[in-house]
Amino acid sequence: MDRRTTPFSGRVAHVSLEGIVDAPLTEGEAAQIILPLTDLLASPGGARDRQLLLGASVVVLDRDQGHVFVQATRDGYCGWVSERSVGRGPQPTHWVVAPGAHLYTDPQVRAPEKASLSLGARLAVVGSWGDWGNTPHGFVPLCHVRPIDHFAPDPVSVAESLLGTPYLWGGNSRSGIDCSGLVQMAFHAAGRDCPGDSDMQMAMGRGLSPAEKSKRGDLIFWEGHVALVVNDELLIHANGNTMSVAYETINDAISRISAAGGGLVQARQRF
C-alpha cells in the first residue's frame, strides 16, 4: 500500500481498510483547513510531503503530539498537519483565481492585510460590500475570486500565471511550489482531478506514442520530474535549475536534465 494515499496513521485506520489493516477503525471526522497554508507531513513534526490550502476539505482520522492525521478529500493524499490548522467552517463558495490575494480587516484598499492567500485557496463568501467579499476570515477583493464551480478553461494558462514563483520541494502555493504541485494546481483550477506527486501523475492519462507530437497541456516526465507543454517547442515547469516556475524549450530541458544526470524522458502523457 502506498503510504501517501492509504488512510492509516500507523495506529488508526479508516473503515475502508477493514480486513486489510489490523488496527482500530474509524469513519473519521469531516473538517477543513482553516489556515492560509499548512504543511502535510509524513509524521508528526516530520518531513513535508505536500501542502494544503485554506478551505481544503479533509477527514481527520487520528491525533498525536499536536498534530492530526488527515486524508485530503480532493486527491486522497494522507499525512499529518498541525492541529491548529484544522477546524470547521461554512462550505466554501469561491476559490482564489489570482496568483495571490490578501485577506483584509475591512473592505477598503488601505485596510491592513490579515493574511496572504494562494491561487486555489477556497473561501466561504457570506456577503459582499461593494467590490469586496465578506468571509469568516476577512474581506477579499471579489476580482480575485470566482464561484467554486467556475473553472479555468486552460491549465497551462494557470501555470503561466505562476511564472517566477519560487521553487519549494513539496510546495503547493504561490509562496513556493514544486513540479508536481504546479501540475496539480493547474489541473485542479481547470476542474480536473490530478494526484499530488509526479509518479502518480505519470500513471494517469494516455501515453503518447513516439510518432505523436506533443500539444499544449500534455505532460512530459523524467524520473522525479514533470513539466507542462506550452507548445511544440516550449514547456513550463517548477524546477531546481532556475529555482522557480519558468519557461524552457523542450529540447534544452531534455539536454540539460540528461547532462545533469536526470536521465531521459520516461513518458509523455495526455490527460
Image (spheres, rainbow, N blue to C red):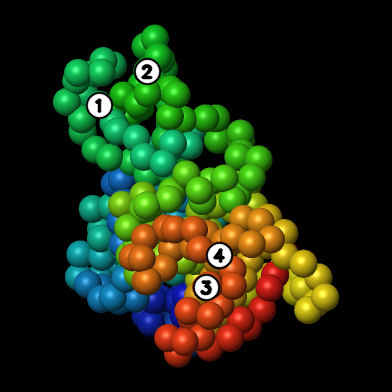
Of marks 3 and 1, the one in the foreground:
3
Q: Judge from the rendering whether residue 18 lies leftward or rightward of residue 57; answer left or right.
A: right
Check disc 1 and give the amino acid type.
Tyr
Q: Earlier in the sequence, mark 4 or mark 2?
A: 2
Instruction: Please tell me whether mark 3 sits on a helix, a strand or a loop.
Output: helix
Label 3 neighbourhood size at 10 Å, few (<14), some (14-19), many (20+)?
some
In this view, the residue in front, 27 or 1, is 1
**For residue 19, what is the image quadrant?**
bottom right
Check disc 3 and give the amino acid type.
Ala
Of marks 4 and 2, the one in the foreground:
4
Circles 2, 1 touching at the beta carbon (< 8 Å): yes
In this view, the residue in front, 140 or 166, is 166
Which residue is disc 2 drawn over?
132
Q: Position of residue 239 (x, y in %)?
A: 41, 68
Instruction: Please tell me whether mark 1 sits on a helix, a strand or a loop.
Output: strand
- Which part of the image, by quadrant, shows the C terminus? bottom right
Res. 249 mark: 4
What's the distance in space between the residues labelled 3 and 1, CA to CA? Answer: 41 Å
Circles 4, 1 touching at the beta carbon (< 8 Å): no
Q: Residue at x 51, y 63 (%)?
A: 248
